[in-house]
Image (spheres, coloured by chain):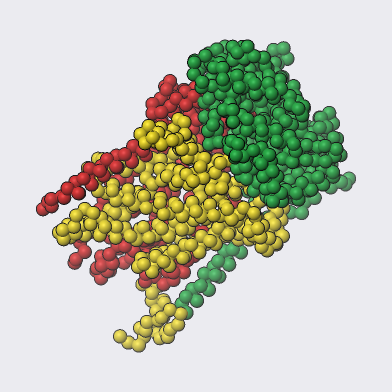
Chain colours: A green, B red, C yellow
Amino acid sequence: MKLEKFKRVVSVLLMVLMVLIMPGCGSKPGNKEGGNAGSNSADQYDKLPKEVSAIILDRGQVPASEGTYEENRWTKYINQNSGVKVKWVPVPRTQDIQKMNTLIASGQAPDLLWEYSRDYISQLVDQGALQPIDEYIQKYSIAYKNYLAKNSELKPYVTFNNKMYAFTSKRGIDSIANHAMWIRQDWLDKLGLKMPTTDEELFKVAEAFKNQDPDGNGKADTYGFAFNYNMAGIVSALYGAAWNIVDNGKIINPLNTERYKDVLAFRKKMFDEGLIDKEFITDTNFTRERQIWVTGKAGIYFGGWNMGNEWKDLKKNVPNAQMVPLESVSTKYGKFGMWQEPPANRIIGVNKDAKNPKAIVQLMDWLIDKGWFTITFGIEGSNYKMVNNVPQAIDADKNRTELGYSGEYALISQLDPKADWFPIMAASDAMSQEYAKVESLSLETQLKNKFPRTTPYNPTSTDISQLSTEFQPIQADIETKVVTGGSKYTVDWGIEQLRNERKRLGGDKVDAYVQEWYDKNKESFSK
Amino acid sequence: MTIKKSTGEKIFIVINYIFIGLCSFIALYPFIQIVATSFSSSRAVSSGEIFWRPVEFNVLAYKQLLQDGQIFVAMKNTVILTVVGTIINMSATVLAAYSLSKKRLKGRKVFLLIIIFTMLFNGGLIPNFILIKNLGLMNKYAGLWLMGLISTYNMFVMKTFFEGLPDSLEEAAAIDGANDIQILVRIVIPLSLPMLATLTLFYAVGWWNSYFNAMIYITSTGKMPLMVKLMQMLDMAQMIMINTNLSGGTEGIIENTVAPETLKAASIVIATLPILCIYPFLQKYFVKGVLIGSIKG
Amino acid sequence: MSEKTVTVHRGKGIVKGKSPLLKAIVRDRYLYLFLVPILAYYIVFKYGPMYGVIIAFKDFRFADGILGSKWVGFKHFQRLFTSRDFLMILRNTLLLNIYSVVFAFPIPIILAILLNEIRCIFFKKVSQSLFYLPHFISWVVLGGIVVALLSPSTGVINIILSRVFGIKPIYFMASTKWWPVVFILSGIWHDAGWGTIIFLAAITGINTELYEAAVLDGANKFQQIWHVTLPGIRSTIAILLILRMGSMMDVGFEQIFILQNGAVTNVAEVISTYVYRLGIQGMQYSYTTALGLFQSVISMILVLGSNKIIKAMGETGLW
């Protein structure tokens, strides 16, 4: 009997406490109607204080002398010059999405929620966390409206369900280029070879690198290729199989194409002919691969367009090494660019509960017009001076302190460094200057060929996520077998397995959905 | 009276020393490599030349991590978090474990069930976040301390230990008129020093390494503890700075002379060194309980 | 003894006069006092947020909040159980945990006992401090060291195998046969030292008189260990074993992630990596909560079950 009484007491206590705590959960914010088209709306926002809150990524870069991410010289500058007072809410870079989600779920999210991933913003739209902004831009914006009109390729990236939910700006070319190939020019010279322009030539060169002792040490210890985590993507891109393919209105997953056979065959050949380190599958961080490259043991590197550290370390180990950019090579399917980022930079969504959308628009207009430049480069005369219309740093250390953290405050920006800016912007020591030239060349080279992005983005759905989650390890398993399994696992076997497994996991349903999505949305892609 | 050891025992002793020595070396080796890495040049690190001693000795990694002083602020924060947190933890654990170790306590089983249930089931991040917000504990260390008031796991270990103490001691004291508080303080605690020291270490290390909760619930950069700060710095270094939107210039590439692996190694050393100093200090509590042997009378 | 003080049995009882329950509470008033803040903590901070588990039965949407989201019953559980490869993931998770309990769990006990037999205080203290060092090294770093050590071409292990034993190099990390072994051994490397601390503390709690008595009875070292040391830490071993059951449905993410590779997915895919990949897809709150709930239920069964078994063996268990 005591136990029963006791249990009763406990359960009452529990209920009482739950009732006390519950009200906070899933707070449904008030029934605000943003953007009510009505003769009073201009007044409606003018009465409110011009205040906006926004996410800022905490990258731990604000020196103590400058302040904090919430308050520093640039937050003050923005408040003073934009006419809008901005409250910045820092979220840790490494867990920004998780932190933002908790803020949203608890009703604490700021007005401006942004990320580099369109998929995330798309999910926020689905979750009902954001509101459409077409009206606000139409009614209140000048600078941003013009900007968007001039850069209409950005529209699909901020359009969801035919409405615009976010602001964005164009990426500078230096953040569009991503994957890239490099080659040892000194080895080409030593062996009397020309720069490869086709996939077959690429292999011939790699084989020569392996067999003809290009480092001249009398030992057969050189590889044709070395790479980082971009490898699979680069090989796929060479055959134009890194993104969905559109053929006569049909949208096709690369796995279902002939090209993917070539992709797998390429990787298999790399392994079978001993052109790559046989232990690459366990080199999950690619440290071993990197080691091979910087100690000068490989001739071609699959990596990113900007590999300053690798270039520098290689130079220190092998002073005569010449690491130069290698342009994409042509295959029987054509010549394609390596992975490049989509043109839209940060996607900045507007919280459904934002109180003053007019102030938001005012802030954005100011940012895209003048604000971005000062926030990025600083004050003329103090941080930079103009040299051939390029802002050149006056004092590198001072700029690192004052500007090292500032860039992202320019949520939207027209920053677009040209390739020839790098030597001007780089430090003055010999190595930095030499690399800056290589950097410029690399950027130009990689942008010569466009990455065939047939659709600006891809659809998301529960089925797609489920398939993706479950298929990934299976794909890794099959492809590893094909690449490293010798004659036992052929490419044809691998392709068949991949397709069957994908089908088993619901691939057909997903493909049908994607086709439907494509048919519905393809008009908006070319707006 | 010394008893002569058999040959078998003598062999065992020798082998034991060798074995333990070997284990110590195996345990130590990775750490030696990490320390060596942290003091080596990036070139040597990327080229895989580090085994047990630094190659091209330099302190750039440490300089980069320590130079703007943020690490020291973070370390100070972590010290506060750890010291107060551990004291709170140990108090709560001892009180709870002691009470729950008494079989005569009515409702004991119910309490234990209530507690065990929470070890296995939890509501997830979002409801927790809402709770902390509603209690007004966002961005406050008090929030972290309250959230982590007690570790059920540690509490059970302590409770089991208390249950293993001979009843006769406590009964004798009770007959002499001591109440539960006095028994706890004068008899039980002195007998439990090794276990108390162990759990203190566990709690302290837990606070010292705390990352996730601090990252979610502490928003001011000035209040961030060490691990969060270190993670941030590592992440920054790892990010390929192709995005010049972040800074006024690309000079960051060559200037960033410290390879991420070196930074990681240095951050492990910085984060671990203080802990290594705590344990030897606690080792002196790993001694036999004071009152053992006074069972009779 | 008057009629008033009647012992009341559980559940029923005749109460005459002053309620025995009240008497007990008064007698143990300090104990209850101690417990009040603790229980309050559990109720507020653990049970308070527990309503969050209902997300598993809903299609959670931020805009609707936890209470307002649509109720979908067991839809997510269905999705989980019909997920084609869920069985494999579950199997791997359980298998790796079973290996760990069988092979890795006893190691700290053995090490603690051996350490205890070291008479030289300095040696003992230094060893103790060194043992737990690997625990503080993140898996990202330790994993890299493990992979390097086991490399068929340049790894120390294979070099020793071929030069000393004449065995051909084995690609341990890429073999589905060897990978679990590597997983367990590296886990021991990482955590065994840390685990010895608690057993050492338990051993120091053993009454020295018991050792003296055993010695008087003519027991040699091995017999002392078997008859005094081990029984002395039995209850600690028991409770730690039961608590270990609570994490059978989980395998530490960091370790798996760093040691995993394309050749061993059949044995290396576990629940935590599955959740990680789900997380990348984003916003799968309801689904992952359902998965978490499933894990919790199974863990509970394992904990209660092992508790029963341990109690039947004569130990105190959880209660």
Whether residue A86 is visible, yes or no, is no
Query: Which residue is at 75% across, 49% downward?
Result: A508
Horizontal side, residue C248 vs residue C9: left or right: right
Horizontal side, residue A314 vs residue C238: left or right: right
Residue A416: where, in percent of width, then height? 72, 23
Residue A367, quarter of picture? top right
Vertical placement of residue C148 versus C295, above or below: above
| Quadrant where the C terminus of chain A is found in the figure | top right
Query: Which residue is at 71% across, 20% downward?
Result: A197
Vertical placement of residue A170 versus B89, above or below: above
Residue C205, quarter of picture? bottom left
Horizontal side, residue A317 vs residue A106: left or right: left
Farthest left residue in view? B1
Of residues C61 and A483, the one drawn nearer to the viewer in this rendering: A483
Query: Which residue is at 50% across, 17% downward?
Result: A317
Vertical placement of residue A527 versus B91, above or below: above
Whether residue A503 is visible, yes or no, is yes
Horizontal side, residue A456 vs residue A59: left or right: right
Residue B169: where, in percent of width, then height? 25, 65
- Give the total of numbered labels: 0
Of residues A127 and C32, the one drawn nearer to the viewer in this rendering: A127
Query: Which residue is at 28% across, 48% downward?
Result: C114
Residue B176: where, in percent of width, then height? 24, 69
